[in-house]
Image (cartoon, grey):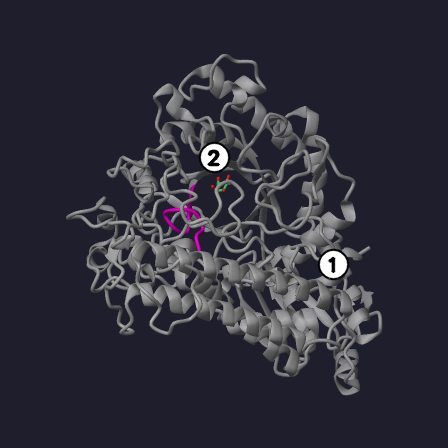
Amino acid sequence: SHATSYRAWLQYTFITSTTYREQVMSLLKEMECLNGSDISESIEQEWTFAIRKMIGFQPAVVPEVKGNGLRIVYVDSMEKEAFHIKNEDGIQILAGGEAGALYAVFTLLRHIQRQGDLHSLNMKEKPANPLRIINHWDNMDGSVERGYAGESMFYRDDSFRENIVRWKDYARLLASVGINAVSINNVNVHKVESYLITERYLKDVARVADIFRAYGIRLLLSINYASPMEVGGLTHADPLEEDVAAFWKQAFDDVYQAIPDFLGVVVKADSENRPGPFTYGRTHAEGANMLADAIAPHNGIVIWRCFVYDCHQDWRDRTTDRARAAYDHFMPLDGAFKDNVILQIKNGPMDFQVREPVSPLIGALKQTNVIVEFQLAQEYLGQQRHAVYLLPQWKEILNFDTGHEGEGTFVKDIASGKTYNPTHSGIAAVGNLGDDYNWTGHTLAQVNLYGYGRLTWDPTLNEDDILSEWSDLTFGQEEHIQQLLEAILLPSWLTYERYTSPLGIGWMINPGHHYGPNIDGYEYDAWGTYHFADRNGLGVDRTVETGTGYTSQYAEQNAKIYNDPNTCPEELLLFFHHMPYNYELTSGKTIIQHIYDTHFEGVKGVESMVANWEALEGKIDDKRFSDVLERLKHQLSHAIEWRDIINTYFYRKSGIKDIHQRKIYE
Ligand code: GCU
């Protein structure tokens, strides 16, 4: 039944070393059976399936293991998702609960696939982040908003697909890297999807929940704030009116009737033209708290997104700054939200650009539950046609010191709950999946899903180790393959940054679909995403003295650093400052020369990605080899397009020549 996961990291390949296989056979010839719950069944299935594929024998599941074998023991004093794998009177998994045991089994299987030592086993783990979420942006017509991997695996033609094997394989992939919650519909909830919380679809939603439950994953739905009108026939959706509260109470009663362990709802309100409490003069807190009260009897949560800004801006208006918006909206409400509301904050203040500062809201909110939101879907990062390994970016973000509780107030500790000890916390990411044979369109984009899970489980893991795990499991444990994949992927984020928009400015892409260079695409529009390039320079002045004052939203130390072009990290210089082309960077290069150089280097970087991949010919299967090669070649031609358009644009604006006299079209 595990057919479709073949082309990802759970394919489990036969281990050719006889010595290792014999060791596994003798140490793990049987497994002690569990209590028959859904998760227990998954554990037994995963274990026997994987061992058979890797080692070539079917371990017996027996009532009692005597001597060598695998035993799972539940320990009340451990946290539910925690485990300890050790070799003591046979191989034992101590776990706080079934989810912990499941994670332990996946961890042990990964260890075996990589031929790890079994005698001195001692792996003690628990997830850093309580909530580890994937947000799908799937629509019920089968499309996926910002989806680059085929159609939705959940829906088609306004119905649920009969895709149970796929859903199960998906749940397996997610559980194997520790994801414990998934929202299955787009944050933009349109007409049909508004009915997901009603009788029309609840049976189907429950089917998905059943499959996920067996892998320790809880379900979320995105809801439409105007459902009382759209679905309930009311004339308004004012959160302070009783009929609205009654509508939601009933709706949640129905949902929990169908899915007793439903986790909760995701809400995009008053954001990009979606309905919300503003229509009725109510605050986000009033809007969210009403839902929170309605779902509280079922112990549900309300995840309220902070992606709120004015998308009807006027470029002539230099006082409004989109980057400020989330903080300006939500900071005054710190402490006003109910305990089962969680604010979900995008990692940066804009929208998943290749380079942004960390959102100033993260860490500033001290009395509010918070989740940090990443984007696996490479909306602005080459849309899964370009290979971009996102872990280096996420590591940087998670390791950022917000300074809100003095030195060392890292984003990773705010997300995990360590800093403020909130009731709920964690990390969410927009998924990068669809029904393509390889799940993610670009096979190399699988590493971002894998890495996202591993990193949210343990933010101290580094991107190199995560990459080598993934490469071993996905392409086999050959050193040469791994080295080539490292050469391709480790620098890929910086490479992408080099051939696209420079020094933190972002956005120079085509409006709407967000693919490909278009430097002035957003320059005179309503979305608040400007670069202000003129003949002297470019960048957005966000300083306190002469700009939008955005820098003041950071804790003092960071505010100071960002506010001054001499201390501002250079990769973000143009995010915070409007600078002349001839301003000299620490490298000794002027900004204009930096733009030229990075764009030539970026293309070179992609050339070596192609060459490194070509060296893998014959080492991996033809299909994945040729599919990835095709995408890398596209990436190369596209990087050239970026390079030439950016370089020409800034040459024409500035009139300053490349000191190396390379080809810049005039
Ligand atoms: C981006 C993206 C939208 C999405 C939005 C969001 O603006 O382009 O497609 O709906 O983010 O996160 O809500």
In which quadrant will I find the C terminus? bottom left
Establish whether ligand 1 lies closer than 8 Å to the Cβ of label 2: yes
Give percent across and percent down for residue 662. 42, 71
Residue extending farthest to the front is 666
Numbered circle sitting on residue 576: none
Relative horizontal placement of residue 212, taking residue 543 as reference (left or right): right
Q: Is residue 614 above or below residue 530?
A: below
Dot 1 lies on which element? helix
Query: Magenta region, mostly helix, strand or loop?
Result: loop
Of the image marks 2 and 1, the number of the one nearer the N terminus: 1
For the point 68% across and 25% down, the residue is 199
Tell me which amino acid carries mark 1: Ser
Relative horizontal placement of residue 70, taking residue 123 as reference (left or right): right
Instruction: Specify the quadrant of the image occupied by residue 31.
Output: bottom right
Residue beneath disc 2: 268
Instruction: Specify the quadrant of the image occupied by residue 344.
Output: top left
User: Neighbour class for label 1 at 10 Å: few (<14), some, many (≥20)?
Assistant: many
User: Neighbour class for label 2 at 10 Å: few (<14), some, many (≥20)?
Assistant: many
Considering depth in this image, is 95 or 202 the residue closer to the camera? Answer: 202
Residue beneath disc 1: 5
Give percent across and percent down for residue 224. 53, 28
Considering depth in this image, is 657 or 26 the residue closer to the camera? Answer: 657
Can the viewer see residue 418 in this picture? no
Q: CA distance from mark 2 to mark 1?
A: 32 Å
In which quadrant will I find the N terminus? bottom right
Q: Is residue 497 magenta?
A: no
Relative horizontal placement of residue 151, taking residue 294 as reference (left or right): right
For the point 63% across and 30% down, the residue is 196
Can the viewer see residue 623 in this picture? yes
Tell me which amino acid carries mark 2: Lys
Q: Which residues are magenta?
A: 343-354
